Amino acid sequence: MLSIKFSVALLPTLIMPTQVSSAPVQVETQNSDFARDVYASRTSLLIIGDSTNNPRGADAFVPYFEGFILELPEDIKLCGMRISGSTGNTGVNRYTSFGGGQTSQLQDGGVKTANPSIDPYGETVAPPGPRNEFVIVEGGALLNSGRVASIGVTNLGGLYPYASGWAYGSTLVLRTSFMTSERGVMLNTFSLVKLSDHDESAGSNVWLFDEEESFDVQLSSTKTGLEQVDLEFPDVPSPRVGILLRGDSDDNDEDESGKDLTWCDHVLFNKDLADEDRGLYFDSISIGGFTARDHTENLDDVLLDDYLRQAPRDINTVIVWLGQNAELDEWNGEIHSVWTDRIELLADKAIAAAKVNGSATPKIVLCTPPNANGIYPSQRFTAMNSELSGLAEKRGWAHLDLQTLIGQSLISIDPDFIGTGPHPSESGARYVSDLFYQHLDCIRTDYNGDGSKDFFDVSIFLEHYLNQNEEADLNGDRVFDFFDVSDFLTSFAQQCD
């Protein structure tokens, strides 16, 4: 527990920095640095792990990823997030709606979700996270004016409490990553049509589109990978946006017969904030059976490069969140080193992918997940926590121990915190997320990472403040003023678990 050893009343009397304490604790320093980035809306975040993806609606379970958006403090600006867009996946509080389209024209009855590895183009590939695909029946024809598949954000307020103010008067972008391949079995020419009904009273209807807002898309056919396509919605009256995927507008269905189209979940973001390189961006991916082995073996390096490229801001932080599920060679009553090796390899995959994209090396945050329903032994989480702590210290990474922060399994705190299986309900995801933000708010003023907040942290803050270093810009407005001092005092006064 952090302890306060310095009276905040003395802060105004300190006008010059003094010698700071020696030998800061590297992991805790990285933790407080991550916390400041989150609260200053500087973080563009990708979570890789289990129980963070595959939203299925509040009647099943709510992934922690969505809990983080539900509980996002109002003073943290939101740039954007990945949204649920897979068949059957509507997300918390049904904030999205999906339409499968002309099933009589599509193989196997319509659009299907695939995850992990699939073989759509004669090559085994695993785009990060869930994705949809449809195959046009051999000899079939797509109706040019007909609906094939549509996705609509119909209740963003059910995911983000400040959605209306976030969207109103801004330009929203709905970005979709499509699979590309040099093989001739793919549909690389098609049309996207904008949703025209922005009335929030329309409920889950995602089938009203503006024919004048139709765009023909030509994907690359020279590589296997992901290619992003944007639709902009300028000055929207509400956060209700959506798209329709359909056959191309040239009426030549011979080129479409027997071919398939595959796309990843969509990204929704505020273009104004993205252009300013501001605001928190959230993404989360899971692979296969959600273990460390699944992720290291099935997360394709090239497709991960492409996936990181779809973010509206460069991914500058990666959280590796694994431990809820494990293979027998990773845990069979005791932890095995192969688990830690896989965690490290996965983080290095993300670092390498960012490097390929020309981005700065992302900060790595290792996370010990919370024990949800108590089925898995608590000693496994304790052992994994110890391994992550050692790995973080070795590599100079951050480590957030949510298991210890919560102190017990979610179900033992409140049975209503559990959804299906080992996954949280909405109230459970919100409980964890609220503790997460409270913890970050508290530790962000432990500048030297020594586990206490005292004169040395005040001195470091003042030095940053006088030099106009972003580490003193605690509210992220890029101005150094009383509000940063006020945020420092508020956080500094808290005792941290």
Image (tube, rainbow, N blue to C red):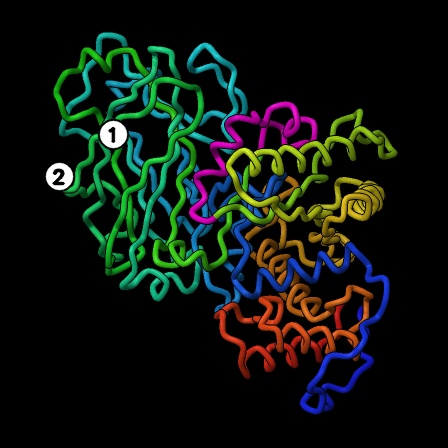
Q: Is residue 428 left or right of residue 378?
A: left
Residue depicted at 38% across the width and 14% down the height: 182
Q: Earlier in the sequence, mark 2 or mark 1?
A: 2
Residue 157 percent across, percent down from the top left:
39, 59
Residue depicted at 51% across the width and 33% down the height: 129
What's the mark number on residue 211?
Answer: 2
| Residue 349 on the magenta segment | no
| Residue 296 on the magenta segment | yes
Q: Is residue 435 left or right of residue 181?
A: right
Q: Is residue 62 left or right of residue 440?
A: left
Quadrant showing the C terminus: bottom right
- Write down the residue under mark 1: 217
Dot 1 amino acid type: Val
| Circle 1 SS class | strand
What is the magenta range? 287-313
Mark 2 to mark 1: distance in Å?
15 Å
Dot 2 amino acid type: Glu
